[in-house]
Amino acid sequence: MNIKTHRIGERKLAEVISDSILISNAEEGLQLLVDLYYQDFESILVYESNITSEFFDLKTGLAGEILQKFSNYRVRLAIVGDFEKYPGKSIRDFIFESNKGRLINFLPTADEAKNKLLS
């Protein structure tokens, strides 16, 4: 895993880059959050390919469990990927509602994510 740092003024964003799954359960999500939080990152960009597909099946509760931790720490998160491949109205509604806010966003490109998180 590599962390690429992006800055605009005082804002500090961690772009997490890896060839493997980094978040397969809530504990791994929390560990990534805490590791970056204590390095003074206020925003994190993670790629969909680094998160287990179970995250996108809302029935597992994994997304809610992980995203609640980001919310508690007030760390902004962007997940970058192609979310059209996940069937079901509930995941689409979840992504739509998340994207209305500023804390958790699901975006198609890293550039859009960086712009959103650093704005």
Image (tube, grey):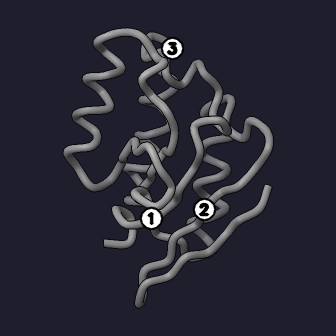
- Residue at x-position 59% and y-position 44%: 47
User: Residue 81: image x %, image y %?
Assistant: 51, 38
Quarter placement of the N terminus: bottom right
Determine the CA span between mark 2 and mark 3. Answer: 26 Å
Badge 1 marks a residue whose secondary structure is: helix
Q: Type of residue at label 2?
A: Glu
Q: Is residue 4 left or right of residue 89?
A: right
Q: Nearer the viewer, residue 81 or 24?
A: 81
Residue hosting label 2? 15
The residue that mark 1 highlights is 114
Query: What's under tag 3, amino acid-wise?
Result: Thr
In whole angstroms, how far apart are the C-alphas of marks 2 and 1?
9 Å
Label 2: which secondary element: strand
Residue contact between numbered discs 2 and 1, judged by CB atoms under 8 Å: yes
> Foreground: 71 or 23?
23
Residue drawn at x 45%, y 51% as measured from the top left: 78
Depth check, front residue: 38 or 90: 90
